[in-house]
Amino acid sequence: MPTPYDVPVQIFIEKLARYIKDNIDQVSPPDWAPYIKTGVHTARPPQNPDWWYTRCASLLRKTYMIGPIGIERLRAQYGGRKDCGVRKEHVRKGAGGNIRKLFQQLEAAGLVENLKGQGRALTSEGRKLLDIMATELKRELEKSIPELAKY
């Protein structure tokens, strides 16, 4: 059975984001989502109107890959380079509020659980969802790229 390790990342995240938007009612962008930046290193808010669902899919995949993971480590993962004008550029962490809010919504949906002192991890329901999505995506890709059938 294919897992998220076996499929292309970008296509997997797009497919998972569409599924979350259409089928999981607990995950929805708050009122302030169109106006916030994703970190101090960015100049403007995201241009994609569905960025909330894309970030949610990315969080689910990162939680699947890395295991129990906390907000601070995810802030570092989603951080970037801050342009300081003529001065040296420095690395800045991403915003933690939107990551925390997404995790709260995923906990309400039953896909993620909070492990005391370790961070957040996928539940069996969340792992099952990602495995099913990876299997469907691999079958779709095998039709267009027959070489993938041997993996």
Image (cartoon, grey):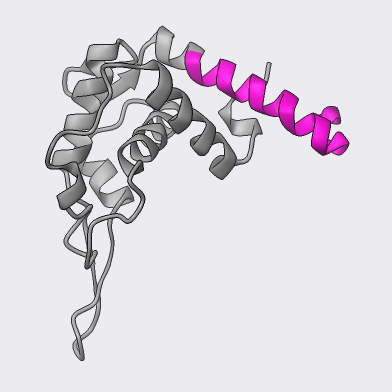
Residue 78 in the image: above or below residue 120: below
Residue furthest out toward the bottom: 86
At x 80%, y 30%, the residue is 142
Q: Position of residue 39 (x, y in %)?
A: 20, 56
Quarter of image, res 33: top left
Residue 122 x/y as whole percent = 37, 18
Magenta segment, prevailing SS (helix, strand or loop): helix
Q: Is residue 77 left or right of residue 116?
A: right
Q: Could one spot residue 118 in this view of the protein?
A: no
The verdict on residue 142 being magenta is yes
Residue occupying the point 24% across, 64% down: 42
The residue lying at 44 percent from left, 32 percent from top is 17
Task: Determine if the magenta segment contains residue 132.
Answer: yes
On the image, the x and y values in percent for residue 86 come to 20, 91
- Above or below, comparing residue 133 to residue 72 in the picture: above
Q: Nearer the viewer, residue 141 or 92?
A: 141
Residue 135 position by quadrant: top right
User: Where, by quadrant of the figure, is residue 43 drawn?
Assistant: bottom left
Residue that appears at 51% across and 21% down: 130
Determine whether, in the image, residue 19 is placed left or right of residue 12: left
Magenta residues (range):
129-151
Question: Left or right of 101: which side holds 25?
Answer: right
